[in-house]
Structure formats: C-alpha cells, structure tokens
C-alpha cells in the first residue's frame, strides 16, 4: 500500500514541512549522521522518520517520526520504525534508541508500536513545564526561610574562590553530571535570576538560567550537593530564582527537571502542573538489534 524510500540529501529538503524544520537548518546538518525514510501513497507524502547515527558508539537514535493525520492508525509508524531496524541490521548497528514527548501521565500512541516491536519499557528522561505569571506570581512562592548557615548569592557575583571549590571537587570526586557543570560556557546566561547557594561559605548548589527569547527564561541547570537534597534546598533555590524573575517584565518560564530527580519531579507535578500552559514528559526507549 505504502511506498517507503530512503531519502538522499536533496530529497530531504522537500520534506521540511513534515520535519517541522526550516530548509536552512536541514542543509546545515551533517548528512552522514542522519538517516531519513519517507512513506508515500501514490506519490503523495504520507509520513517521515528521522534518526541520528552515532558511529562512535554504534547506536542509532530515532529523533522524530511524523505521519499525516489522514494516514494514521494504518500501521505506518510501525512500518517506518521497522525500516530503521532493518537498516541497523544491514549496517551492523547494535542498538536503537527512540526519544519522544508525551502529555504528562498520558500514554502516547507510539508506545503501542514500541511494545509490538519489543522495545524496552519507556522511561522518563526529562519533565518540562512551560508557564507564565500564573506560576511566577503564585502564592506558594513564600519567603526563603533557610538556616543561617546557608546563604544565596547572585551568580554574576561568583568569586574565584567558589569557582576553584567547584573545580577541585569535580576533579577529585566527579560529582557533577556533565550537563549540570556551572563552569561550562552557557550562551545567553540570564544573570537576573541565576543564583548560587553557600553552606558555611562553601558551595552547596546553584540554579543557572538562560534567556531563550525576549519573554522566556529557561531554568536550565539546577544542582544541589547530595547531602543537602533531603533538606529541600533545591526547591528553595528554585523558589528564590522564580521570585527574582517575578520582579522583572519577563513573563514566561520553562522549567526542565531530570527524570531521575524524584523530589523535584514530584514538586513540579504537585505545585506547578495545574498552572502550566503545558507540561510534558520526554520519554526514552531502546531495543537491541
């Protein structure tokens, strides 16, 4: 019924609308790292799948799959994924990952396909919450009542001593996940509400924010030392940072929480979810080939 074809570099451009990408961004991609299969019905576009090939780790990650509405519920998603699986076998790829988004707590229709194709049970990678003044001006943003041994400081005022503390600890103990290292260069860092936390003048945690656009701040990097996490210091950092934003004219915020951060994930669901414009989960699944 459907014709499936692997797209070459020139053909990919013609699918920019289905890919939800502009043509220039597609042209800038490394063509050797991406795989595209498209489905057609009597020569008309019906769907597409995009996957990233990591040659170093011998893994393919399915990043995007789209089927035009009138062609859905005909098994086309399953067919497209199967073509990626077949490609992996033909090219001696060991593992296929897939990432996708779903509305909080709701099963995505792709999950039925993944189960059929024997992918692993989906796990949450990140939880994203996007909102406006409904969260920023919420009553639960109470006074920051932290013990006197703790102290907030503005990240723009970080001292060389604090930077050396972070660097020395990281070199010795590898206690900071790569994405959460505050000393890595961050483009468009928002100093208005990027905040650090000290305990007896030693670094205890931080929240680093990034300006996504004129009216949106991304709460990008929230980290608290392990020994302070059960004391809800992460929540207090977030609370303090949101309050600082509430004093500006920047009306929107995007909060992203790691799926394995149980305390913060439950906090977002309990306190923030009902006031979000949207809240969604980034999910991941895999299968060995």
Image (cartoon, grey):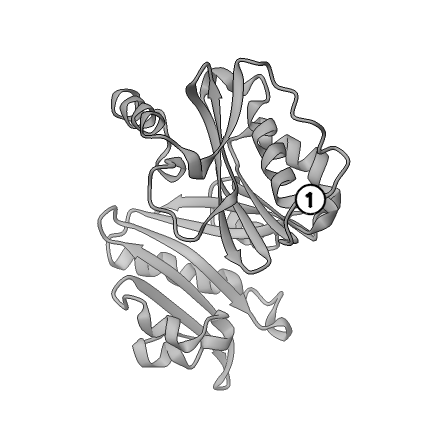
The percent position of residue 110, horizontal first and vertical second, equals: 56, 54
Q: Residue 226 location, x and y as percent?
A: 46, 19
Q: Nearer the viewer, residue 96 or 262?
A: 262
Residue 99 seen in the current view: yes
Total labels drawn: 1
Q: Secondary structure at mark 1?
A: helix
Q: Which residue lies at the image location 34% right of the left edge and 37% below the top edge?
A: 183
Residue that appears at 32% across and 67% down = 29
* Up/down of 139 relative to 234, above or below: below
Image height of 219 relative to 18, above or below: above
> Please, which residue is most extreme toward the bottom here?
43
Q: Is residue 47 above or below residue 179?
A: below
- Residue situated furthest right in the rendering: 139
Establish if 220 lies above or below 79.
above
Picture coordinates of residue 51, whole percent (x, y): 38, 60
- Of 83 and 139, the residue lying toward us: 139
- What residue is drawn where x is 25% and y is 25%? 171
Relative depth, front residue between 86 and 61:
61
Label 1 sits on residue: 136
Instruction: Left or right? Give the position of 28 relative to 134.
Output: left
The x and y percentages for residue 10 are: 32, 81
Q: Nearer the viewer, residue 153 or 58?
A: 153
Q: Residue at x 45, y 64 (%)?
A: 80
Classify 10 Å Cα crowding around label 1: few (below 14), some (14-19), many (20 and above): many
Relative to 57, is 73 on the left or the right? right
Q: Is residue 47 visible?
A: no
């Amino acid at each position: 019924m459907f014709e499936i074809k692997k797209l070459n570099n020139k053909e990919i451009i013609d699918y920019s609308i289905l890919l939800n990408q502009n043509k220039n961004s597609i042209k800038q991609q490394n063509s050797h790292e991406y795989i595209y299969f498209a489905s057609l019905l009597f020569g008309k576009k019906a769907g597409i799948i995009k996957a990233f090939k990591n040659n170093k780790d011998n893994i393919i990650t399915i990043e995007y799959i789209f089927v035009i509405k009138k062609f859905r519920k005909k098994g086309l998603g399953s067919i497209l994924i199967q073509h990626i699986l077949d490609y992996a076998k033909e090219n001696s790829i060991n593992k296929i990952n897939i990432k996708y988004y779903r509305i909080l707590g709701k099963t995505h229709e792709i999950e039925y396909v993944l189960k059929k194709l024997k992918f692993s049970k989906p796990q949450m990678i990140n939880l994203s919450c996007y909102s406006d003044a409904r969260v920023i001006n919420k009553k639960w943003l109470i006074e920051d009542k932290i013990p006197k041994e703790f102290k907030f400081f503005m990240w723009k005022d970080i001292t060389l001593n604090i930077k050396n503390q972070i660097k020395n600890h990281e070199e010795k103990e590898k206690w900071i996940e790569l994405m959460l290292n505050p000393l890595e260069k961050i483009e468009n860092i928002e100093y208005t509400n990027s905040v650090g936390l000290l305990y007896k003048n030693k670094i205890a945690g931080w929240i680093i924010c990034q300006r996504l656009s004129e009216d949106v701040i991304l709460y990008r990097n929230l980290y608290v030392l392990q020994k302070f996490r059960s004391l809800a210091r992460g929540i207090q950092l977030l609370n303090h940072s949101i309050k600082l934003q509430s004093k500006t004219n920047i009306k929107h915020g995007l909060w992203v929480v790691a799926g394995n951060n149980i305390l913060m994930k439950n906090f977002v669901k309990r306190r923030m979810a009902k006031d979000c414009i949207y809240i969604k989960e980034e999910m991941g699944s895999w299968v060995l080939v």
